């Protein structure tokens, strides 16, 4: 077992940021915490890497208690915070040189990291950080996080400041680390990041871990709860009964459409049942469940 989080709770005075959260992460696994802003994802990661002490609960990394054996546990992890900041007077190279000295890493790791990771500084690497865009600053933070060759990489919203092309490049880079056997833990509120990178996902809402499942399970959950919007030339309430008999769930009338949920394998039967009952279907479309809808599903 690489990481074990047991009954983690973190209070800030009267506010409970993380409430009785437990999960395990296996060696070599890519694990994502998905949730809206303010759901407790960042606080959970800060407790995991030892930047914040839990109010109650326990976290171990390869058997090391993060609270009691912090120094040894931290050597196994490299952390990228959600918001990175560097001195404007330093160049990108000088930033990496500083962190090499801070973590006692050989300076040759700078070129090794840049050559193998393809961070695309677009000629700005030897210019001052004051000239960096938000996306390039984020890339520099990723490079800093990758300098130590730790077995565990912990990333808080790693694609938050990247443009679409930069986000794609980052996902490719993270996939290469995954193939090398790195254990990766990251947070996101973007489904694309989670779907393309994670093996398993934990969903957090209001400080609680409300779901824990494989990425395939998450895809099935989204498909199972996707809405089917059927536009008819004429609406009649008996079409609702026909749809339900064919396996539809939560059927409602909206203007000139039937909006329903059903298992993916039942949708064709539902369409045929509506037609058999006299409905003239003009069009139909699947509307996937949004992340906001999914979060509300777990809140309610």
Image (tube, rainbow, N blue to C red):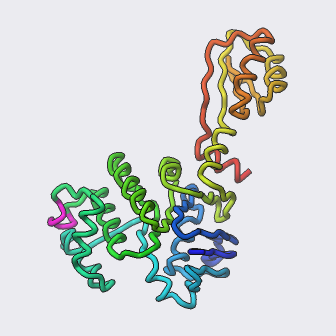
Q: Picture coordinates of residue 186 (x, y %)?
A: 49, 63
Q: Determine the image quadrant of residue 203.
A: bottom right
Q: Residue at left 67%, top 63%? A: 209
Which one is in front, 234 or 193? 193
Number of on-image labels: 0
Taking the image as shown, residue 4 lies to the left or right of residue 46, namely: right
Q: Residue at left 78%, top 17%? A: 273
Q: Quadrant of the N terminus?
A: bottom right
Which one is in front, 143 or 178? 178
Task: Kindly report the secondary structure that dominates the magenta region of the rendered protein.
Answer: loop
Q: Determine the image quadrant of residue 115.
A: bottom left
Q: Residue at left 74%, top 29%? A: 266
- The magenta-colored residue range is 124-130
Name the residue furthest front: 180
Q: Picture coordinates of residue 116 (x, y %)?
A: 28, 63
Q: Picture coordinates of residue 19 (x, y %)?
A: 68, 70
Q: Is residue 62 magenta?
A: no
Q: Picture coordinates of residue 155 (x, y %)?
A: 45, 66
Taking the image as shown, residue 243 lies to the left or right of residue 285, namely: right
Which one is in front, 209 or 60? 60
Taking the image as shown, residue 37 lies to the left or right of residue 207, namely: left
Q: Determine the image quadrant of residue 157.
A: bottom left
Taking the image as shown, residue 97 lies to the left or right of residue 191, namely: left
Which one is in front, 181 or 233? 181
Q: Residue at left 66%, top 59%? A: 212
Would you place residue 242 above or below residue 10 in this image?
above
Would you place residue 179 above or below residue 260 in this image?
below
């Amino acid at each position: 077992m690489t990481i074990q989080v047991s009954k983690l709770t973190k209070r800030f005075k009267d506010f409970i940021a993380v409430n009785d959260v437990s999960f395990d992460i296996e060696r070599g696994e890519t694990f994502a915490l998905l949730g809206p802003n303010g759901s407790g994802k960042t606080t959970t990661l800060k407790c995991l890497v030892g930047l914040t002490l839990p109010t109650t609960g326990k976290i171990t990394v390869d058997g090391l208690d993060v609270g009691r054996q912090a120094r040894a546990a931290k050597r196994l992890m490299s952390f990228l915070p959600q918001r990175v900041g560097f001195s404007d007077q330093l160049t990108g190279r000088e930033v990496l040189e500083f962190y090499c000295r801070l973590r006692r890493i050989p300076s040759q790791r700078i070129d090794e990291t840049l050559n193998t990771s393809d961070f695309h500084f677009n000629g700005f690497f030897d210019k001052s950080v004051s000239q960096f865009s938000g996306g390039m600053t984020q890339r520099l933070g990723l490079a800093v996080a990758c300098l130590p060759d730790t077995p565990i990489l912990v990333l808080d919203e790693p694609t938050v400041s990247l443009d679409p092309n930069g986000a794609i490049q980052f996902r490719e880079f993270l996939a290469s680390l995954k193939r090398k056997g790195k254990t990766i833990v990251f947070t996101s509120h973007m489904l694309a990041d989670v779907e393309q990178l994670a093996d398993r996902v934990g969903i957090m809402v209001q400080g609680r871990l409300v779901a824990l499942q494989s990425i395939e399970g998450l895809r099935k959950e989204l498909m199972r709860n996707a809405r089917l919007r059927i536009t008819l030339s004429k609406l009649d309430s008996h079409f609702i009964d026909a749809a339900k008999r064919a396996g539809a769930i939560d059927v409602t009338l909206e203007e000139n459409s039937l909006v329903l949920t059903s298992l993916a394998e039942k949708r064709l039967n539902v369409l045929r049942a509506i037609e058999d009952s006299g409905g003239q279907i003009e069009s139909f479309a699947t509307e996937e469940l949004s992340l906001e809808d999914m979060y509300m599903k777990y809140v309610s």
